[in-house]
Image (cartoon, rainbow, N blue to C red):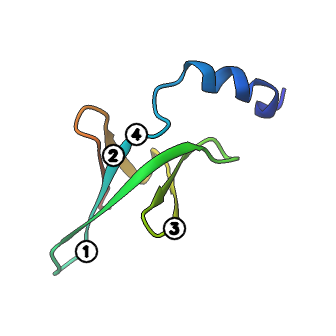
């Protein structure tokens, strides 16, 4: 079954639309960069879709990010 069939029902019960979170990224030898994004929904691949103030899209996936729901913070995991 394709997700599109369940998408409307799913969005009726989920909590994240409109939630503002911070993407925090620290590059080696540089200071931490924070980007504030707003959760818009899910991407076609099932990850969180977020946009920043300039309209740039971000796909937040659990394998590359650590999401702290209570702090509204997304941190990029370092290998």
For marks 2 and 3, give the one nearer the viewer.
3
Q: CA distance from mark 4 to mark 3?
A: 16 Å
Q: Which residue is mark 1?
A: 27
Along the line of sight, the residue nearer the viewer: 6 or 30: 6
Of labels 1 and 4, earlier in sequence is 4
Of labels 2 and 1, earlier in sequence is 1
Q: CA distance from mark 2 to mark 1?
A: 16 Å
Give SS at disc 4.
Answer: loop
Q: Which residue is mark 4?
A: 19
Drawn side of residue 45 relative to residue 67, left or right: right
Give SS at disc 1.
Answer: loop
Which residue ends up furthest to the bottom in the rendered image? 29
Q: Is residue 28 above or below residue 76?
A: below
Residue 56 image label: 3
Quadrant in which the N terminus is drawn? top right
For marks 4 and 2, give the one nearer the viewer.
4
Of labels 3 and 1, earlier in sequence is 1
Q: Is residue 31 above or below residue 70?
A: below
Q: Residues within 10 Å of mark 1 (few under 14, many from 20)?
A: few
Along the line of sight, the residue nearer the viewer: 27 or 4: 4
The quarter holding residue 47 reads: top right
Q: Which residue is mark 2?
A: 66
């Amino acid at each position: 079954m394709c997700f599109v069939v369940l998408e409307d029902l799913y969005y009726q019960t989920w909590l994240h639309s409109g939630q503002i979170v911070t993407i925090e990224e620290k590059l080696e030898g540089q200071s931490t960069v924070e980007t504030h994004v707003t959760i818009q929904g899910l991407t076609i691949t099932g990850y969180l879709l977020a946009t920043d103030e300039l309209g740039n899209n971000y796909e937040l996936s659990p394998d590359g990010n650590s999401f702290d729901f209570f702090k509204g913070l997304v941190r990029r995991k370092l290998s």
